[in-house]
Amino acid sequence: MNMENIARIVRGLAADAVEKANSGHPGLPLGCAEIGSQLFFSELQHNPTNPSWPNRDRFVLSAGHGSMLLYSLLHLTGYDVTLEDLKEFRQLNSKTPGHPEYGHTPGVETTTGPLGQGIGNAVGMAIAERMMAERFNTDTHTIVDHFTYALSGDGCMMEGVSSEAASLAGHLQLSKLILFYDSNEITIEGRTDLAFSESVAKRFEAYNWHVQKIDGHSFEEVAKAVAAAKADERPSLIVADTTIGKGAPNKQDTAGVHGSPLGAEELKAFKETIGLPQEAFFIADDVKEAGQSVKTRGQELEAQWERIFEEWAEENPKLAEQWRIYWSLELPANLEEILPEYAVGSSSATRNSGGEILNALANVIPNLVGGSADLAPSTKTHLKGYSNITKDDFSGRNFNFGVREHGMGAVVNGMALYGGLRPFGSTFLVFSDYMRPAIRLSALMKLPVIHVFTHDSIFVGEDGPTHQPVEHAEALRVIPNLNVYRPADAQETAQCWLSALRYGDGPSAILLTRQDLPVFSKPEGWSVERGAYVVADTDEPQLILAASGSEVSLAVETADRLTEQGIAVRVVSVPCRELFVKQEKAYRQSVFSPDTPIFVLDVGVSFGWYSLAPGERMSMLTLDDFGVCGPGAEVASYLGFNVDNAVAKAKELLA
């Protein structure tokens, strides 16, 4: 196998595709052609004809702007990425978008682009591999045994998420994680020393990683580094010194080759320099043959694994059934029956009832795993009776992510991408800002991740405005594909958990209170599945009170007071706006009657509530400002969230 020629073809395909699109990033593909070729043609355990083979090695291109490196390698090794797909790089609805997109292109393991997120995803995948191996391998059969590779660049190393994730990986000693660092010392603005002068190698050594430095253009050094990485008990960083845009005689080693086509003259000179014909998208016959060999070898590897798997399944039928449940993400049929019951009139913080519900669910959903950013005693997300994941034991179900919200978001995404697991993470709602890039990506990829956010309002109280979320619920609600649940009491919390688990088109966020909330009476057949429902009604309501979360209790009290004054009121709870707006018009209008004024109570910003009944007569008691420090109930009353003020504001609307 002529690796030099393979790398030459990879460079040519990448340069041609970027040139044809007149858009893209040729620098990384040209600079990392040797690394990519060595991995895909010689190192990776993968079957291009079955990109979802469970025991494949994972490859994550964290530096997603270099996507043409990945697309070229996928095409050459036999994935369902055709030459025509390469020619359609960055074009509308092509298989080869500007940055890799999960679920869109065969062989792409995760959506990358925001730098550093891919490193976090890779850490999550490596964690998942250890967890699945612990659960399913036996003394006589090994069915989970593979590596996770990632390729990152200088930008990935500058972003903070990579530090958080790498620190956790070193702590957990993820020995099957191999991270290549394309150290070409060039970013968009120029040389990296404009803003970046640290030793990445020393930083990762401090994280307790195995660190090597190599010439990234030497196949021999790449191969030796991979072998050494596999032999070490720590996660491995391979610092590869490379030349960005290698082979482009006038542009290599400059910022100009990072994100712009070479141009006709430079492309011609580039092909002359590296010894390629001028023919666009040229692929030599020996490279085609080498790619076919990779495909054949991959099919043989999977066939060998299938034989082992069948023997294992025959000897371990209960484990085999668990394997099926894990990988299908199948839920038990009787979930409603195992949930705790909460009597009307009882009272508890939804974070407390949420923890009880989570534990009840975990007892019957074996692949429900997760943890918190050092806040489990506050978020109540510790799974009782199950151990914590440690570097020596991955059989547990609880994670200590440390104070690393950004990294936690990327890691749980990686665990979900790996498959088989239902991961959740938790922190205070106000810190969802740290996680927003990862949440957005999980929504883009439609991953079944659940985010538990507690301390959901100004009722946090004494911690003051830095810890009192005001705009955060609304900020989450504007992310497409993300269901945001804000239950009003323990009963709603249980249904929100079920809805989140059953939601198949993306992640969910469950927002829970620190303060106690009373369980209120509900009509027969009530459900959060339609997003909003009528809590209390009258034949001809003069006013509709609408709220979510803790404010539903305030709405009920306000309705009682208004009823005493002869005003007919309907109370509506809106636990999930995203579900409600998807309902048929008749149902929406049965909840929010077009001719009835609507008064909204929300201890957050007003933005977004108008989407429930656009154009209708509406007024609000909301908080378009920050909170203040003090006991929670006093803070709420001081800011106007009390029955007296709510009644007065509602009557103003009627007047």
Image (cartoon, rainbow, N blue to C red):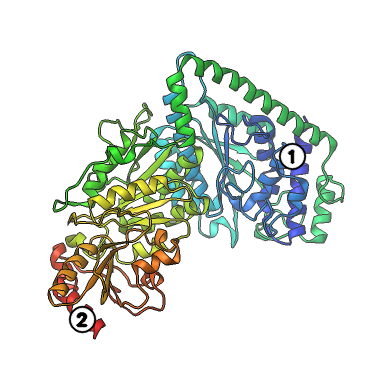
Q: Which element carries disc 1, helix, strand or loop?
A: helix
Q: What residue lies at 14% left-to-right and 75% top-to-bottom?
A: 644
- In-front residue for pair 584/192: 584
Tell me, yes or no, whether the two marked residues, 2 and 1, touch with CB atoms within 8 Å. no
Q: Is residue 649 above or below residue 529?
A: below
Q: Is residue 390 left or right of residue 24?
A: left
Residue in the foreground of this view, choosing between 454 and 255 = 454
Q: Quadrant of residue 322?
A: top left
Question: Residue 9's spot in the image, x, y percent?
Answer: 78, 43
Q: Secondary structure at mark 2?
A: helix
Q: Is residue 366 visible?
A: yes
- Left or right: 293 as drawn, with respect to 586: right
Instruction: Give the CA distance from mark 2 to mark 1.
Output: 71 Å
Assess disc 1: are there few (<14), some (14-19) or many (≥20) residues with their C-alpha within 10 Å of its C-alpha: many
- Relative vertical location of residue 221 with respect to residue 623 in this rendering, above or below: above
Tell me the residue at 52%/50% (across/down). 445
Q: Earlier in the sequence, mark 2 or mark 1?
A: 1
Q: Which residue is disc 2 drawn over? A: 651
Q: Nearer the viewer, residue 363 or 227?
A: 363
Residue at the front extreme of this rendering: 539
Q: Residues within 10 Å of mark 2 (few under 14, many from 20)?
A: some
Amino acid at circle 1: Leu
| Residue holding disc 1 | 76
Name the residue located 41 percent from the left edge and 60 percent from the top edge. Answer: 578
Amino acid at dot 2: Lys
Residue 178 in picture, x, y percent from top left: 53, 35
Report the quarter where the C terminus lies. Answer: bottom left
